[in-house]
Amino acid sequence: MVEVEPIARIVLTLMRFVVFGLSLGLTLISFQAYRKKQSQRLQYAFVGFAFISMGVAISSVITQLGSEADQAILLFFQMVETIPFIIGFSMLYLSLYR
């Protein structure tokens, strides 16, 4: 019988790479748009996507820690993980609101 867990971990890792690649792609596209037409809205969008990409990267690292880390340390990292997402989505909100 085929063991499911290693296959599932490989698929999950590949999916995380896809999410990270997409977030970096959005960051690059928003940076290029900002360089062409330097407006405050595009700057906020670029910074927002950059922080969201950072949050995706941090979340992938935290997932790799998994159950190997102490629960208190894992909780701390999960709390820290939300900060880039809060900043990123706030910046996107500002770029769309203005």
Image (cartoon, grey):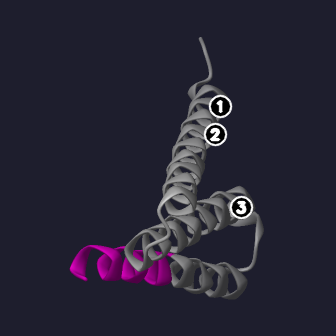
Q: Residue furthest front?
A: 37
Does the CB distance between marks 2 and 3 fall below 8 Å? Answer: no
Whole-number angstrom distance, CA of label 2 to CA of label 3 = 11 Å
Identify the secondary structure beneath mark 2. Answer: helix
Q: Position of residue 97 (x, y in %)?
A: 23, 81
Q: Amino acid at mark 1?
A: Ile
As displayed, is residue 56 above or below residue 47? above
Q: Amino acid at mark 3?
A: Val
Residue tagged 2: 13
Mark 2 packing: few (<14 Cα in 10 Å), some, or many (20+)?
Answer: some
Residue tagged 1: 10
Residue 17 placement: quadrant:
top right
Residue interval drawn in magenta:
85-98
Whole-number angstrom distance, CA of label 3 to CA of label 1 = 15 Å
Whole-number angstrom distance, CA of label 1 to CA of label 2 = 5 Å
| Marking on residue 61 | 3
Residue 81 placement: quadrant:
bottom right
Mark 1 packing: few (<14 Cα in 10 Å), some, or many (20+)?
Answer: few
